[in-house]
Image (tube, grey):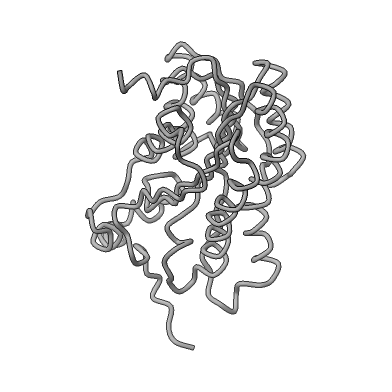
Amino acid sequence: MILDLFRLDGKVAVITGAGRGIGAASAVALAECGADVVIASRTQRDLDAVGDLVAATGRRALTVAGDLSDLDVVRSLAAEAQREFGRLDIVVNNVGGAIPLPFFDTTPEYLEEAFHFNVTTAHALNLVAVPLMLEHGGGAIVNISSVMGRVAGRGYGAYGAAKAALSHYTRLVAKDLAPRIRVNAIPAGSTATSALEIVTSTPELKSMMEELTPLHRIADPEEIAAGVVYLASPAGAFLTGKVLEIDGGTDVPSLDFGLPDL
């Protein structure tokens, strides 16, 4: 049956930024498809809640609380997967983000911080994960990017540039790791995560985001997670180096900060 292609029985996944939102939804979705998971974020309470949801699927979750901007913490996740489960097959680089800022407030230091958190952390984890994947024949990497890596809007210089870099990093590294490891990305559109609560709780801003999205709504995290499952599972076995846009058809920023001309 076609649904069998989405099974991940016996596989092990590491998901960063998995305490809430897209990361949490991805962890649960992968577990529902049969994978055990290593989930990491800053807050143990959030991880425990996600771990309970994973346990309810009949799979196991190892939680790692830490600052994922610290490359040593990020690198440790692959070893934790190997220690706890004996293998690693899937990496979901979900951690990232950067607060939009006007041009003159976007310092070089802030730009470097955005690249570090969105691109360098992913590469650091991939470097230590790939040898473990190769021990069992290969694997899949899914990088969570953003529609703002493709469309342009004022205030998004740091965030958009970092996410654009992550999307193209995906294409480049897919060449390096083919054919045994597939690397794909999902540039997500506006999604109902905790990062957007300040927006979605304001009726005017929420209405703006919905109006500027052709499907006239904000995505649920599970809709992005469905894409993660597709790219990580045998269903996506003939995809690598692809940037799968799950963005409601967005072609302009869904949030306009109204920054004036200089």
Q: Residue furthest right?
A: 72
At x 48% / y 36%, what residue is drawn?
A: 20
Drawn side of residue 75 relative to residue 241, left or right: right
Quarter of the image for the N terminus: give it: top left
Q: Which of 163 and 61 is in front in this view?
A: 163
Measured as percent of width and height from the top left, residue 128 is found at 73, 35
Q: Nearer the viewer, residue 259 or 126?
A: 126
At x 68% / y 33%, what residue is drawn?
A: 129
The image quadrant that residue 92 belongs to is top right
Measured as percent of width and height from the top left, residue 186 is found at 45, 47
Q: Residue furthest bottom?
A: 262
Measured as percent of width and height from the top left, residue 188 is found at 41, 50
Q: Is residue 182 above or below residue 56?
A: below
Q: In this view, does 96 lie above or below 162?
A: above
At x 65% / y 46%, what residue is drawn?
A: 176
Q: Which residue lies furthest to the top in this view?
A: 58
Q: Is residue 30 above or below residue 242?
A: above
Measured as percent of width and height from the top left, residue 31 is found at 46, 21
Count every numbered label the image shows and give the total. 0
Q: In this view, does 234 lie above or below 72?
A: above
